Image (cartoon, helix red, strand yellow):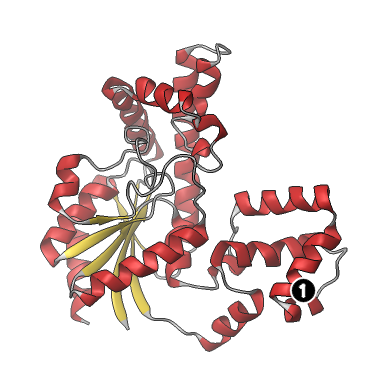
């Protein structure tokens, strides 16, 4: 099976710097698994790699969309799969790097959505569609794309129908085909999962707070205001980005800047908790505490993995 390394973990844990270090040591290229770094001009708030960092190692899936465009987990899988094939065809090692754990898991585990929390945005849209157009409309769509799955439920079982359609819209794979993949165990890549985290919660929280303060020192308020004036608040996917959405009420005059900054820090801390929980569910994921110099351990693990 082909090799790939996933560098995941909590916000502010140092994923980018570690990935660049490892790529330079092992001849790798980075595929960004960050749901917001795909957007142009959303630089500071997404902690996008700097121009200097981008010059050190080839990066994929960064700055590929305008804020007005949608981006789903299915879009990520399609683009990242192409990037994987390109990187491996040139004899390089793909490093999938980012905190959006669902992206990495779905890329290497085609049926993972059926066993995970799924894609909340798609599920919410489908639920609203069922309320607006009727459950029968969604069921008719399911009958069209996957008659076997439709036969396993009924039109009035909205929750099940939504779940089936969520799987299809997020992955492009029908629930029936996903079950077949699950049973066959088909895999093309054997990824090594490496997750950065902090056993000391106060450490990661202090790093998050310091990073948010640094972002504002770099001009986050100005960047976010410019994007807001360009329509970010109405953007279908980009509007959900932490670091931007909390500033919308401030721009509308509904709260002060200090309140918005505090909310960014709180939402970032909450996200860090969810990131740690998600990666803990991935079988075989190796965790490294950022307080114990994880780079040496990571280099050893990657070397052993590539030599297997």
Residue 163 found in image quarter? bottom right
Q: Is residue 293 visible?
A: no
Q: Is residue 110 visible?
A: yes
Whole-percent x, y for residue 233 in the image: 54, 30
List the single residue furthest toward the right.
156
Q: Residues within 10 Å of mark 1 (few under 14, many from 20)?
A: some
Q: Which residue sits at x=82%, y=73%?
A: 153
Q: Which residue sits at x=36%, y=20%?
A: 222
Q: Which residue sits at x=74%, y=81%?
A: 148
Whole-percent x, y for residue 46 in the image: 37, 38
Q: Which residue is mark 1?
A: 143
Q: Is residue 234 left or right of residue 7?
A: right
Whole-percent x, y for residue 277 in the image: 49, 53
Residue 193 found in image quarter? bottom left
Query: In the rendered image, which quarter contains the C terminus?
Result: bottom left
Query: In the rendered image, which quarter contains the N terminus?
Result: bottom left
Looking at the picture, tell me which residue is in the foreground, 142 or 106: 142
Looking at the picture, tell me which residue is in the foreground, 113 or 76: 76
Residue 288 found in image quarter? bottom left
Above or below: residue 197 compared with residue 218: below
Above or below: residue 40 compared with residue 283: above
Q: Is residue 182 left or right of residue 15?
A: right
């Amino acid at each position: 099976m082909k090799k790939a390394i996933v560098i995941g973990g909590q916000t502010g844990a140092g994923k980018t710097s570690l990935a660049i270090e490892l790529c330079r040591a092992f001849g790798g290229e980075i595929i960004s698994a960050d749901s917001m770094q795909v957007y142009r001009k959303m630089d500071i708030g997404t902690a996008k790699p700097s121009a200097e960092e981008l010059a050190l190692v080839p990066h994929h899936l960064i700055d590929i969309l305008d804020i007005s465009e949608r981006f789903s987990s299915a879009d990520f899988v399609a683009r990242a799969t192409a990037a994987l094939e390109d990187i491996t065809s040139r004899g390089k090692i793909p490093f999938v790097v980012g905190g959006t754990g669902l992206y990495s898991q779905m890329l290497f585990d085609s049926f993972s959505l059926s066993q995970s929390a799924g894609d909340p945005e798609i599920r919410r849209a489908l639920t609203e569609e069922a309320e607006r157009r009727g459950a029968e409309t969604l069921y008719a769509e399911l009958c069209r794309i996957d008659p076997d799955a439709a036969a396993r439920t009924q039109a009035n079982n909205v929750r099940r129908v939504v779940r089936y359609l969520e799987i299809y819209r997020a992955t492009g794979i029908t629930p029936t085909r996903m079950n077949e993949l699950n049973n066959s165990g088909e895999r093309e890549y054997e990824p090594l999962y490496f997750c950065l985290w902090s056993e000391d919660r106060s450490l990661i929280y202090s790093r998050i707070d310091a990073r948010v303060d640094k972002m504002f020192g770099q001009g986050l308020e100005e960047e976010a205001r410019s994007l807001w004036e360009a329509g970010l608040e109405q953007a279908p996917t980009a509007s959900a980005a932490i670091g931007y959405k909390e500033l919308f009420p401030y721009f509308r005059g509904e709260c002060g800047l200090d309140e918005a900054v505090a909310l960014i820090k709180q939402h970032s801390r909450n996200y860090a908790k969810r990131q740690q929980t998600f990666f803990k569910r991935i079988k075989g994921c190796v965790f490294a505490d950022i307080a114990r110099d994880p780079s040496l351990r990571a280099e050893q693990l990657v070397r052993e993995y590539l030599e297997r």
